[in-house]
Image (cartoon, grey):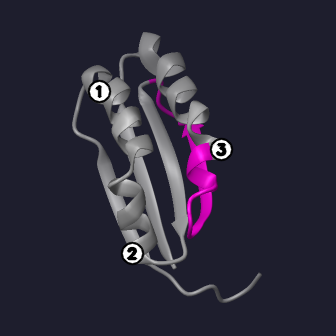
Amino acid sequence: MLIAHVIFSVAPENRTLAIKTLKHEVSVVRAMDGCIAFIPFLDATNQQNVGVLHEWASSDAFAAYIASDSFASIGETLRPIMISPPVSKRFDATVSQN
């Protein structure tokens, strides 16, 4: 399983647009082959940060998402409002308990 945490900063007045953009794609992304979770969130400790928690069955499934129209559409809206580069951390994981 691949887990990805993505955090990015926007001006506080753009947080609503950022989370709305991510939420708009939730059903599309979650329907993709290999998607286990796609969870957009607002950072409650920082008024500029927005994030997404991803869980994918494999690196290949995540790569297909990155190459998708949905990912491109999200980026078209979010990249121009980011005030710094996103921080993306990817982890190979094994579920030890359900």
Q: Residue at x 29, y 42 (%)?
A: 86
Q: Amino acid at mark 2?
A: Asp
Q: Is residue 21 left or right of residue 81?
A: right
Q: Amino acid at mark 3?
A: Ser
- Looking at the image, can residue 76 be seen? yes
In magenta, the rendered stretch is 28-47
Count of labels shown?
3
At numbered mark 2, what does the secondary structure look like: helix, strand or loop?
A: helix
Q: Is residue 38 above or below residue 98?
A: above
Q: Quarter holding the C terminus?
A: bottom right
Residue nearer the viewer, 77 or 94: 77
Instruction: Find disc 3 in the rendering and name its residue.
Output: 27
Q: Is residue 29 magenta?
A: yes
Instruction: Find disc 1 in the rendering and name its residue.
Output: 82
Instruction: Find disc 2 in the rendering and name its residue.
Output: 60
The first of marks 2 and 3 along the sequence is 3
Quadrant for residue 76, please give it.
top left
Give coordinates of residue 57: x percent, y percent: 54, 76
Residue nearer the viewer, 42 or 75: 75
